[in-house]
Amino acid sequence: MRELSLIHKPHDKFFKETLSDLQTAQDFLQNYLPRELLEFMDLESISLQKDSFIEKELEETFSDLLFQTKINHKDGYLYLLFEHKSYPSPKIALQLLKYMLNIWEQKTADQPTAKLPVIIPMVVYHGKARWNSPVKLSGLIEDYDQLPLAVTDCLPDFSYLLYNISRYSNADIKGSVKLQIFLKLLRDIFEQDYTVFLKTLEESIMAFNQLENQGNGLEYFETFIRYIMNARNDLEFQTVYELAKESSLERSEVIMTIAEKLITEGMEKGIEKGMEKGIEKGIEQGVEKGKLEVAENLLRLGMGIDVIIKATGLREEEIRKIMN
């Protein structure tokens, strides 16, 4: 199994780099918010808030974005929670309630008598497992439907908007090229049929041709590549390289740059381990271990022995020993 442990939270970066682009965020909201909500919103006034409300222990599972906009002519918020894993969280409405309370507390901290602003919670999910978590908080309360009105009046309740991307057809996916690349890849990243995923990957790489004139097109392409390589254990680096080369020489060079960064990160990781031991011998051993880890990663990525020798300085017999 190929593992790119050197890549730090690429799912989070892919999500945030896509939807923190206000034009793409507006595009998503314009196409996917219910019409009856859009009628009361001014998406031209939207701005991104810099806060995240995810607990540290859940950062590998969730990402979030908070947008401020005008809702019914007043400042309000759109809270977008993205679930990375391939199966749904059973109590996500309870998590949302916690995050909404944190937002309200933060936004009214210096105004004790201020009214609470509107928050519209949204969840993006793209796992293959069926979504079976209640979309209303009351769905988590035991026998809620059988409770008398006198009791339910004392309980909090709300609904969140669910975007189950894994159920979207190509016809359901709308918006700009960047948004479509994002949504189609999310839809198929956990696809068990490798050929289906590979077709989406090829189409996505080709679609980047239309983003080349945008200033951060190549930077976004790197984020895209790091995400797919981390999410798919059955995808070889050489396959991605060949697909990119067919589409654009410049983007194939970006992929090789990513490989070089992995090498550098691996070397630094080895040095850091050595320095922790506090002696010169430990540093040397750390560097050597870093080279071996990089060589193993590159072998799993489908890179040739000659390339690995040049990248790490290891001898051919050392690399063949790793292969065996």
Image: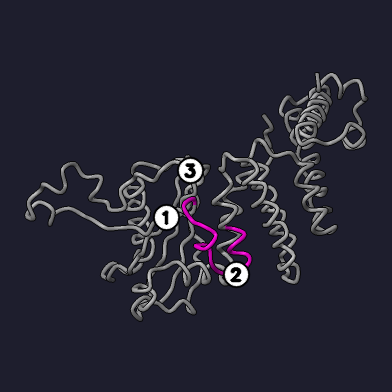
Please identify the quadrant where the C terminus is shown. top right
Q: Position of residue 104 (x, y in %)?
A: 34, 62
Which kind of residue does numbered mark 1 sit on? Val
At horizontal 69% and vertical 39% (from top left) the residue drawn is 235
Are there few (<14), some (14-19), or many (20+) residues within 10 Å of tag 1? some
- Give the secondary structure at mark 2: loop
The earlier-in-sequence mark between 1 and 3 is 1
Which disc number belongs to residue 123? Answer: 1
Please identify the quadrant where the N terminus is shown. top right
Q: Position of residue 221 (x, y in %)?
A: 71, 57
- Give the secondary structure at mark 3: loop
Q: Position of residue 240 (x, y in %)?
A: 75, 46
Q: Nearer the viewer, residue 62 or 33?
A: 33
At horizontal 42% and vertical 55% (from top left) the residue drawn is 123
The earlier-in-sequence mark between 2 and 1 is 1
Residue on which disc 2 sits: 176
The earlier-in-sequence mark between 3 and 2 is 3
Q: What distance separates the C-alpha of mark 3 from that of mark 2? A: 25 Å
